[in-house]
Image (cartoon, rainbow, N blue to C red):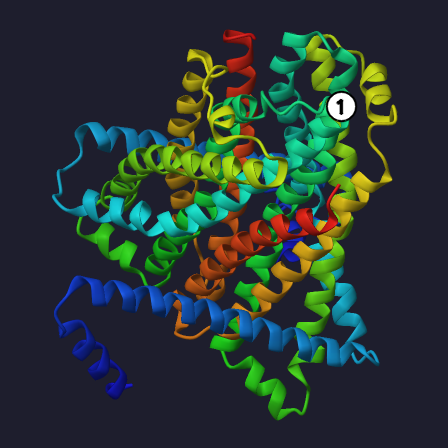
Amino acid sequence: MAAQTGASTAASAEPGGLATLAGNVGASFLDIAETTGGMTILLARIVARTIPPRVDGRELLKNLYKMGVKSLPIVAVTALFTGAIMVIQAAAIVKRYGAEGLLGWGAGFGTLREIAPLLTALMISGRVGANNTAELGTMVVTEQLDALRVLAIDPISFLIAPRFISIVSTLFMMTLFADALALFGAAYTGQALLGVSPTTFYNGLTGGLLGFGDVATGLVKSVVFGFVIGLASCHFGLATKGGAPGVGRAVNSTVMASAAGVFVLDYLTSFALGG
Amino acid sequence: MSNAANTGDRQTEPVPPPLEDLGAVGQLGAAAIDLLIGGRELYSVFVRTLYYVARGRKEKGALLKQMYEIGNRSVFFLSVTMGFLGMILVYQAGLQSKRVVPDFTLLGATYLELLVRDFAASLGALMLATRVGAGIAAEIGSMVVTEQIDALRMCAADPIDFLIKPRFLASLIMTTVLIVWAGTVAFVAGGLTAYFAFDVPLRTFFSMQMVDFGDVATGLAKCIAYGAAIPIVSGYCGLSTFGGSEGVGWATTRAVVNTSLAIIILNFFISGAGFLIFPG
């Protein structure tokens, strides 16, 4: 500890802003590499506990209820408003070209492929991921994890694996809900704002321009996002140190890592799945 | 258990039963009352912040420090996320228009219009809500838990004047600045994606022909609304922290969720108003 602080003061005492800048950039790259590596190792550990399954069943059910069922209201509100916003954004273009039949397709394409999975992931990352980090972080800070180890209970299969599985499945199911509710909200906003009847909206949605592929793309994305959010929240929760402020910092880094990971992987998944 | 004993002793003073015993309607009512109380307290924080902005004490350096904390330290995070977002949006929009009319001449102009009117502000603000909002709530929450806020009150200093006001002003300025930057990053990233994925010349893509006054006004209104909402909502969540280190975690979680919800709901109303005021 003392040696570290000594080294850092020596480094900052050296002249030249450029060297400090390069040092900072390098440090943040090392930081990112460390986080990614930690998350990968955690994933390997979780996978090792699922084949053959050695996951605590009661804990899994409890977490599924707490993360899945309890997130429903917030996902519903987000989805309804998101659908409405998508229609408002499409409205100007629809009005300009008078293509009311295309409203369902226009709003549906963006919602199903991109916006519904993305916003659901952001909300779940805030509600479930951050919460999970806070819980795990508190357990680490109050040494409950060490107590588990003393009792010869494997913290990964008792605490981490159930949470990880719950987060992934929650996000998948919530994206299904969000897809449906966002289209519902979009259909009725279209009626209120543009006078496009919901029937026209649904016809535009199912008229052949949209297929199962679009829905599937969104759902594949939701699983990928679930992996990122689950891994980030468990990783930062386990890496918490330093009392109450430490828990706050851990939650903060979880939300940031989840958001950045979701966006980066969103792009890569879109590209990999192509048209 | 103590609740049950109370109701047995004194019938006149109604003690609310625990949440599980309420039934569906009762739970809905309890949630509504909670929402109402939360809304009122949020409003009170907002009004007091505005009061202190006008009448509060002047502290040199606090505003600059918060501007650095909120603004400069978010630039990297925001640039990365919004850059990827720009690439995704253009890629998806390109795929979409390929199916209907394989004509990419208006891709850039339409994209810029949507970016100015909505996506830059809303998605950028959602990113800021996670970074800045969680940071504010964690910081203030730790202060509450370690009783520093009580110490402030003991010194007759309102924590809103001391803590929320500088964050409010800094966020108001820096959110606008950061969102303009985020929009630029997203647009350039989108332009490069269009060039490499769909062979759209950059000169065609970088076109401002569809951006009009209404779009800019809506976008700026959103920047200001989000800039005000982020510190107020997350500051309120931080101030209402209770319990030890777990409480700080809860406060941070609530800050992220509530700030994101506030942004989505504000977006709905401002977008709707923008569409009605500037149609077409």
Which residue: 46% across, 67% down? Answer: A32
Location of residue B45 with respect to A131 vertically, above or below: above
Which residue is pictured at 53% across the width and 46% down the height?
Answer: B84
**Residue B160 location, x and y as percent?**
28, 42
Quadrant, the C terminus of chain A: top right
Per the image, the residue denoted by label 1 is B100
What is the number of callouts on the image? 1
For the point 52% across and 14% down, which residue is it? B273
Q: Is residue B6 visible?
A: no
Q: Nearer the viewer, residue A186 or A136?
A: A186
Image quarter (top left, top right, bottom left or bottom right) of the N terminus of chain A: bottom left
User: In the rendered structure, the residue with mark 1 lies on which chain?
Assistant: B
Residue A32 versus residue B102: which sits nearer the camera?
B102
Taking the image as shown, residue A40 lies to the left or right of residue B170, namely right
Residue A21 coordinates in the image, percent (x, y): 25, 62
Residue B89 image position (x, y, % from top left): 59, 36
The amino acid type found where label 1 is placed reads Val
Residue B57 picture location, percent across and down: 14, 37
Q: Quadrant of residue B264?
A: top right
Q: Is residue B68 above or below residue A110?
A: below
- The local crowd at label 1, few if under 14, some if 14 to 19, many if 20 or more residues have their Cα within 10 Å, is few
